[in-house]
Image (cartoon, helix red, strand yellow):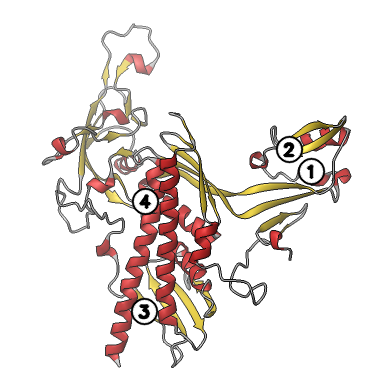
């Protein structure tokens, strides 16, 4: 296989070829060097494209899919966050049953940095170091000032809808001073938790604790964390004239442009990154042998969208910390296992 | 505040099992072939570690499997040449993976401080 093709996944009209890499010592020829750390240092690159308050897009280049995938999996399931774990229902006369209401409350994302809190094991008592307490007491009543012919429940009644903004943080211990500059609250104020009608009320105490997404999705710090491989469009033979227009229309806008070169209209790839790899171009007979669609196997375009509790750039950094910590834990466990084996004999 | 701010622990250490790594019976006498059973780990560590170990030219074979989906266990099989053994290779693999993560992390931070990206509020 040609050297430059080794890290390309080839997209054909009915199949995908060269899917898995073989970048391992000796897999191509005896002289091939191992992709050791030294080589990783040279091949590794990161390009940050865009950052917003809750989203980051960056390119991770030159690593194996297993590393990129570990990063993605950790982002989804192994970065700790704070979420509602226990709801003490004092009174609930609403139509939504206790367990359903508790589940709905559990999914409300909480604005709190998990690094300010300790882990709480089942046998640990709740303390100001491992638990956040919210109180919610909502009673629905008739709105006396509403017009007699009013039909809109939000105007006829007070508290006809219960929103996440009605969770009241109850600081314990020194929490009020510790979090004076970053008060703990639900990230979004407009999450509808339940609806009530006059005479119904909900009174509960809510405890949040630290957890990870693999235990329950409510602990996941991200809304999405995904990657895709960079698409590449290779034009093997010039595509000119009306064909160039047809070629351009096979791709999403902005991927291919028609340029005028010496009076000849010619198709030119301007931004393959925008391509959805729909393979439309492979359906046309006139482009047979003129175009090749590939993806770069070691170029990952990451998209991470945070729920809002932890900034997206911090999430990526923490995900790598988690993976490093996993290595440390396994290394210590390996040393212990070998010691144990020795003493058995 | 008794939260360690210097080196935060992301993994609840008390939840790490006592016998996190076990050596599956059947290792060769010269220790060049061995299967390690790691508890409470999955594809996240398994696949990344497998890749790192395979980069070692002394390794003849490395593969991982999750023997049963409802058991939180990952098996990693290593076969090496006679110039080393599976335990050392495993150790090196873990070190290399950590170093690789460290490299990615410092590169990410470097790019963050360089600030060659667009930023918007929404």
Q: Which residue is mark 4?
A: A318
Q: Chain of mark 2?
A: A
Question: Mark 2 vs mark 3: same chain?
Answer: no
Residue B64 in sight from this viewpoint: yes
Mark 3 Cα within 10 Å, few/some/many (few <14, many 20+)? Answer: some
Residue B113 x/y as whole percent: 40, 41
The answer to whether residue B23 is left or right of residue A23 is left
Tell me the quadrant of the picture where the N terminus of chain A can be found.
bottom right
**Of callouts 2 and 1, which one flags the residue occurring earlier in the amino acid sequence?**
2
Q: Is residue A70 above or below residue A233?
A: below
Tell me the quadrant of the picture where the C terminus of chain A can be found.
bottom left
Disc 3 and disc 4 in contact, CB within 8 angstroms: no
The answer to whether residue A275 is left or right of residue A101 is right
The answer to whether residue A279 is left or right of residue A61 is right
The span from disc 4 to disc 1 (Cα, nearest Å) is 41 Å
Q: Which residue is mark 2?
A: A251
Closest to the observer, A67 or B110:
B110
Disc 2 and disc 1 in contact, CB within 8 angstroms: yes
Question: Mark 4 vs mark 2: same chain?
Answer: yes
The span from disc 1 to disc 3 (Cα, nearest Å) is 53 Å
| Disc sitting over residue B71 in the figure | none
Disc 2 and disc 3 in contact, CB within 8 angstroms: no
Question: Mark 1 vs mark 3: same chain?
Answer: no
Q: Secondary structure at mark 3?
A: strand
Residue A74 x/y as whole percent: 42, 55
Q: Which residue is mark 1?
A: A281
Q: Chain of mark 4?
A: A
Q: Secondary structure at mark 1?
A: helix
Q: Which residue is mark 3?
A: B22
Q: Chain of mark 3?
A: B
């Amino acid at each position: 296989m040609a050297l430059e093709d080794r890290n390309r996944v080839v997209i054909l009209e009915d199949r995908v070829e060269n899917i898995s890499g073989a970048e391992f010592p000796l897999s191509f020829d005896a002289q091939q060097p191992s992709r050791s750390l030294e080589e990783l240092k040279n091949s590794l690159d990161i390009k940050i494209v865009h950052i917003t308050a809750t989203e980051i897009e960056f390119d991770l280049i030159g690593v194996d899919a297993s590393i990129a995938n570990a990063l993605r999996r950790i982002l989804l399931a192994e970065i700790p966050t704070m979420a509602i774990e226990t709801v003490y229902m004092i009174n609930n006369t609403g139509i939504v049953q206790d367990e359903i209401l508790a589940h709905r409350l559990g999914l409300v994302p909480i604005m709190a940095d998990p690094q300010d809190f300790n882990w709480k094991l089942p046998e640990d008592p709740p303390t100001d170091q491992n638990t956040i307490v919210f109180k919610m007491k909502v009673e629905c009543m008739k709105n006396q000032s509403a017009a007699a012919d009013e039909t809109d429940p939000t105007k006829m009644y007070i508290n006809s809808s219960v929103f996440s903004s009605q969770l009241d943080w109850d600081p314990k211990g020194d929490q009020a001073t510790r979090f004076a500059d970053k008060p703990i609250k639900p990230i979004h104020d407009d999450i509808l938790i339940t609806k009530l009608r006059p005479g119904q009320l909900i009174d509960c105490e809510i405890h949040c604790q630290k957890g990870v997404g693999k235990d329950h999705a409510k602990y996941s710090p991200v809304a999405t964390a995904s990657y895709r491989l960079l698409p590449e469009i290779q034009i093997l033979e010039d595509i000119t004239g009306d064909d160039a227009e047809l070629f351009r229309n096979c791709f999403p806008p902005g991927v291919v442009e028609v340029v005028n070169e010496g009076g000849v209209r010619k198709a030119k790839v301007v931004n393959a990154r925008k391509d959805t790899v729909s393979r439309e171009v492979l359906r046309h007979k006139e482009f047979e042998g003129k175009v090749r669609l590939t993806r770069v196997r070691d170029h990952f375009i990451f998209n991470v969208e945070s729920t809002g509790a932890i900034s997206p750039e911090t999430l990526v950094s923490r995900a790598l910390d988690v993976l490093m910590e996993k290595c440390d834990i396994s290394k210590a466990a390996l040393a212990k296992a070998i010691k144990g084996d020795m003493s058995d004999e | 505040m008794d939260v360690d701010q210097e080196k935060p622990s992301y993994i609840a250490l008390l939840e790490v099992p006592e016998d996190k790594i076990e050596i599956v019976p059947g290792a060769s006498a010269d220790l060049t072939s061995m299967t390690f059973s790691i508890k409470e780990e999955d594809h996240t560590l398994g696949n990344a570690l497998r890749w790192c170990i395979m980069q070692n030219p002394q390794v003849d074979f490395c593969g991982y499997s999750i023997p049963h989906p409802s058991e939180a266990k990952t098996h990693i099989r290593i076969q090496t040449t006679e110039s080393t053994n599976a335990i050392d290779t495993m150790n090196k693999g873990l070190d290399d993976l950590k170093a690789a993560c460290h490299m990615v992390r410092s590169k990410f931070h470097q790019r963050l401080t360089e600030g060659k990206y667009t930023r918007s509020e929404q």
